[in-house]
Image (tube, grey):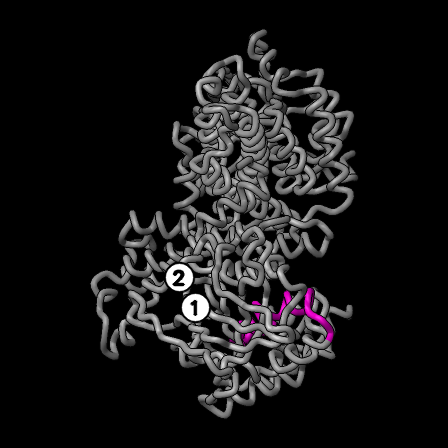
Amino acid sequence: MTNTDSFRQATRDWLESNCPESMRHPYRNEADACWGGRNCKFQSEDQKNWLERMVAKGWTVPTWPVEYGGAGLDSEQAKILKEELRRIKARPPIESFGISMLGPPLLKFGSEELKQQHLPPIARGEIRWAQGYSEPNAGSDLASLQMRADDMGDHFIVNGSKIWTSYGELGDWMFCLVRTDFQAKKHEGISFVMFDMATEGVSTRPIKLISGKSPFTETFLENVRVEKNQVIGKINDGWTIAKYLLTHEREMIGGSGISASGSLPVSQVATNVVGTDNGILSDPMLRTDIARFEIDERALALTIERARDEVKAGVSLGAVASMFKYYGTELNKRRYELLMSISGQDALVWEGAASRDGYLPKQWLRTKGNSIEGGTSEIQLNIVAKRVLGLPG
Amino acid sequence: MALVLNEEQIMLKDSAKDFLQGRAPISHLRALRDNANADGFSRELWSEMAEMGWPAILVPEQHGGLEYGYTGIGIVLEECGRTLTPSPLLATAMMGAAAIVKAGSAGQCEDILPGIASGERLLALACDESSRHSPHKVAAEAVETGAGYRISGSKVSVVDGHIADTFIVSTKTSNGVSLFLVPADASGVTVKPYRVLDTHYAANVSFDKVEVSKQDLLGPLDGGLTVLDYILDVGRVGVSAELLGVAQEAFERTIEYLKERKQFGVPIGSFQALQHRAAHLFGEIEMCKSLVIKALHTLDEQADGDAELVSLTKAKLGETAHLATTEAIQMHGGIGMTDEFDIGFFLKRCEILENLFGDNYFHLGRFARQRNY
């Protein structure tokens, strides 16, 4: 047996005895996701145990070094772990912007002190992080952000407002882009800072979306004290870190083009709802669109796999995070357009148990934001055109 | 298998690229056309390809081949797509070799495979009977006689039909469909070649009471459809690899043009309307690269093939190469419409390959059926 085979077997065995049965199903609704944090309320003993056991293994952040709460797995082992989790349809033990967004730049650019302070609590799910990037007047043109941090010697005093903070009211700490040099060119006067959202002067206000839900807030900072030792990288060099983090954010969002483990293929939803004649979907026009969609879905999954294989083989695809973000989000929007068409008038019901409180139409509305958040599709295409294709201007 | 090429395969790719770009760039195709070459390809170039071992790639070592697998031949076909080089690689070296290796008797293997490997034998699959690909509808018949079979029927759009020495013919037999190997010079075989829009040739081939022996049966009697589907699927993956080369080359030439061509005092590639279309196309081509390498690996790994993967690959490659070649014309503007400029050749070749062995609609439908809808 090779090393990878024995790792797979050991992983499978461990998951078999440690992943509670109730954690082996896709989320039924948003409340099933565990986000951790200071105010975390576990929905069940199983959910708590699942997180704690994975934390003890270092498997909430399997590729991070052991000293920061990870398991130090190489990419091959991490892939195996992922496959084994998928095989039993295991839920993620935790959803975390600390892991998916802040972790990578902190590992790459953070001082040893900052890594030791922040990474282990992230790995354990003890601190829930919020992202402070967009501002009311800095969306696609993110680098024009105006939140000001005035230098007070050993600390900054920060004023301004952020928008589109995911779950801002539930955040414990925020990583945030602020302007620290008001004379420099727009990309060169930005710093990447972190602060505790319990600090005096921080407040949030929910934003109600077209789905009726409020997953985002505006976040206001009024004379908020931020310690200077909470800057990642150099002061005024925050844009480098901001971009690096965005790459990871885009890869994460791009993955949304692939259907979640355990969810039914769109074509199967269609045959269940629309029916078939002699094995052919009863609506032939819809059938063609579904076939095109499922082809692209498989192509994207294989391309993500190929990108990983190329990284392992030492070939880098380059600025492909933008390509994946564009492709994945456009695909996810198509998925929900098809699901709405398949369900017909049932898809229009907004309330009541039969529709799971309008789960489908609310999800459909939510996906419209996929190609806006994390950089619009148009911004991603700009990046591909300039950085990958080398087109001028 | 990881979705990357290994070192040997990278070397093969590089040598194929060097050879084709040196010996058979687009000007080679243009010369074949302008000189009205009746073969539609250069026999001299084919013997050089044979010296490099390309027709031997799929042939087992015991029959004088390299046994280098589908990924190997796919790499070469992809490079042929970049230079639009016509040759019997697809019909003989890929589909012909696959057919004999998969279904040939010991005698057929010994008779044919060494000649494929050396480049001397040329095969052609004669299965279509109407202008729209529908390989399971077979009207041609093989009637049992005392000594063997008597074949009658008409086949159309036979790739390399004008040069083949042997046809693989699908026929109706008493309880199904059977494949036969029929020599082109057999009595009753009539070959009518015609030129298609990319200057390649195909042929309509009719069989009038052609007598063949029992030893000419390829694969099981009445069980020929499974073999036929396999040969076609191999061909579809080969076509997809070639389409990938066509799409990439047309795309790269277009990007270069966007950087050079100036209007309003700036390179037209600085306009966002063109940048976004180019960036979108880049993503689609990346998807296609993954599908082609996966489909080639799967042919190497799975004896029975994977019809769902083949059809999704052929459909996606057809649509993407179509987009790449039509966008190439549009983005080149007026010069793209001229015969003097090469970019139009890519559009023409793409149209042929898209149609070959089932167009995009055929494969969307087949993909859906494979997934039970």
B204 vs B182, left or right, is left
The secondary structure type at the circle numbered 1 is strand
Rendered view: B370 above or below B171: below
Q: Which residue type does callout 2 highlight?
A: Pro
Q: Nearer the viewer, residue A262 or A168?
A: A168
B35 vs B357, left or right, is right
* Residue A15 magenta-highlighted: no
Q: Position of residue B161 (x, y in %)?
A: 54, 22
Identify the residue position indicated by label 1 in the image. Answer: A161
Identify the residue position indicated by label 2 in the image. Answer: A136
Residue B234 is drawn in which quadrant? Answer: top right
Q: Residue at x 59, y 44 (%)?
A: A387
The residue range painted magenta reads A84-112
Q: Position of residue A128 (x, y in %)?
A: 52, 79
Q: Which residue type does callout 1 highlight?
A: Ser
Q: Nearer the viewer, residue A3 or B368?
A: A3
State yes or no: discs 1 and 2 in contact (Cβ < 8 Å): yes
B86 vs B368, left or right, is right
- Structural crowding at the residue carrying mark 1, measured as other residues with C-alpha within 10 Å and reported as few (<14), some (14–19) or many (≥20): many
